[in-house]
Amino acid sequence: MNYLEFEKPIAELEEKITELESVSSSRELDLDAEIDKLRNRSRALTREIFAKLDAWEITQIARHPLRPYTLDYIERMVVGFQELHGDRMYADDAAMVAGLGWLDGQRVALIGQQKGRDTRERTRRNFGMSRPEGYRKAQRVMKLAERFQLPVVTLIDTPGAYPGVGAEERGQSEAIARSLQVMSTLKTPIVAVVIGEGGSGGALAIGVCDKLLMLQYSIYSVISPEGCASILWKSADKAAEAAAALGVTVTELSRNGLIDEVIAEPLGGAHRDYDAIAGRVKAAVSAALKPLTALDTSTLLARRYAKLTGFGRFHIHK
Amino acid sequence: MNWFDKIIPPKIQTKAGLGKRGVPQGLWSKCAACQAVLYSVALQHSLQVCPKCNHHMRLAAKPRLQAFLDAGEARWLAESVQPLDILKFRDRKRYRDRLSDAKKASSSSEALLVAHGALKGAPITAVAFEFDFMGGSMGSVVGERFVRAVQHSVTQRQPLVCFSASGGARMQEALFSLMQMSKTTAALTRMRQLAIPYVSVLTDPTMGGVSASLAMLGDIIIGEPDALVGFAGPRVIEQTVRETLPQGFQRSEFQLAHGAIDMIVDRRELRDTIGALLAKLGFNGVSPPPADRPDDTPPTAGSQPSPATASSAKRE
């Protein structure tokens, strides 16, 4: 297990437990009672620490190197997943995964950003940062889903759209804008789930939806806390303050009515139990899809339009 | 104030608002591109385009819209939509204070102004971003005003023109500002389905969330010369790829070469160009040009095209 800075006390306890376990097995001593006591203490400590995480600590869990990624969910949630590749224009973007499969007996199109687990894979997946071809592949699969009446499920996990020369040359802005356009009138239900990092326009490009779910320790923000800190505080060191001010956590986002539902994570975060969190995401998505698939298209689109144009807080000066 | 100014008796001190030699400030400006010293009134007439080198300086939203619409025709819309600091956002400065500073600095009520009027006699809605208002950043007010402009165009069945100038989303409104991208897009998409034209004019700079939503969705996209247009800022890209960017990267000319925009038009010709374009899309105000026949023969009532005309038409 890979522990974060604020989890140090938990890490120390867990280390002690491992030590005792090896002693008990090698010397055939009965330390079970002692080990159980430590386990309980570790759980209590985890509960205590996780009960008062701040926005910056949650950001670190959302970016945890062991956090389950899109393909980990697909593997556990979807039966018969068939990945589809390429934007039919330029390339296949490995940072964006798209395909078809069965979720809880319902055929669906699945689209999600994919980060890499090791160095090679991270480079191949470009750290989950899509280029225009990624968004264009997503648009293509969404339109396919629309024609064959499959609901669309998106899994959001990206630091943002890739800031590169080639991406700009091939129209990163247009690709994102077009995705927003396609999704705003797609004639099939869309459920989006933020599973890790919801990074700005790159996240929204697959995040326009009828229902937006978020994992408990995921984040969603207009700009990364580091980026915001370096612009507004003139120092990237103020990222923790920026994370708090931006209100990137589910608590703040729910309070402001920006998300529809929160999916609770296992104690210690999603990375502690892949099967458990995948099961919960599957159940939540399935439950969200049911009422949406029952709607006729014009009602679905009218509601989506009202939801999208309803975002924003301002006052009317008489 | 230096020591010399301090010892001068107050009566001899120059009056506030006057420059060193008693010249009112702002009478002369300097072109940032060619350094030419320009008479401000002349510069106003040329819509802040340098008459010496054609450099397009920033033009504020209000004079921009007034100059674009037929004289005396601009009527303002959605001014009542005003900002709220819902998150009590505070960085080194409070958002509330930034808002009131921006109002003073720009003399605009927010980062987007909406007007309706006529272009060459044809009814039109036009919106312009105010860059001096917090970098033209898009928050809830910009999103709502934009949507109201779209709705006005829809109910009146008249074209919409947008002049963008923005660094992107307004960080101080956090996720609310991100959602303005999908909000404005949803409204534009509905208008698109009704076949009402939307012309997007990209002025310096059009970046981030504004570029990646309403700005890049024009039926026709026009760039002003040398405007910086892109998603990620050049500094962010430089830090990511660790190399210096080529000359002209992300400028209008670059966007034209990469197929992202339809054309580059001098600011002083935007009225003519957009008026003519909208006429071709069937939204008339200008009288149609004379019948453009390949063989230049005057049209006669009921006549069939000559074989030569028909074949040349086919070749096109």
Image: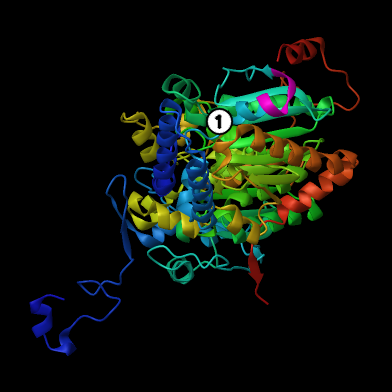
Residue A42 relative to residue A110: left or right: left
Residue at image location 89% in from the left, 28% down from the top: B301
On screen, residue B175 above or below A69: below
Q: Is residue A79 magenta?
A: yes
Q: Is residue B284 visible?
A: yes
Report the front residue among A312 and A156.
A156
Q: Residue at x 38, y 48 (%)?
A: B51
Q: Which of the two residues, B231 or B93, is positioned nearer the viewer here?
A: B93
Provide residue B112's location: percent of width, then percent of height.
57, 58
Q: Position of residue B4 (x, y in %)?
A: 8, 78
For residue B255: magenta?
no
* Above or below, A85 relative to B69: above
Quadrant for residue B114, please give it: bottom right
Asked if residue B170 lies left or right of residue B160, the reply is left
The stretch of residues the image draws in magenta is A75-82
In terms of image quadrants, where is residue A187? top right
The chain letter under disc 1 is: B
Please indicate, yes or no, whether residue B123 appears anywhere in the rendered image.
no
Task: Determine the image quadrant of residue B70.
Answer: bottom right
Q: Nearer the viewer, residue A317 or A135?
A: A135
- Seen at 17% across and 88% down, the residue is B10
Where residue A100 sits: x, y (%)?
Answer: 74, 22
Q: Quadrant of the C terminus of chain A?
A: bottom right
Secondary structure, mark 1, is: loop
**Residue designated by label 1:** B260
Query: Who's the residue at 50% across and 26% down the image?
Result: A116
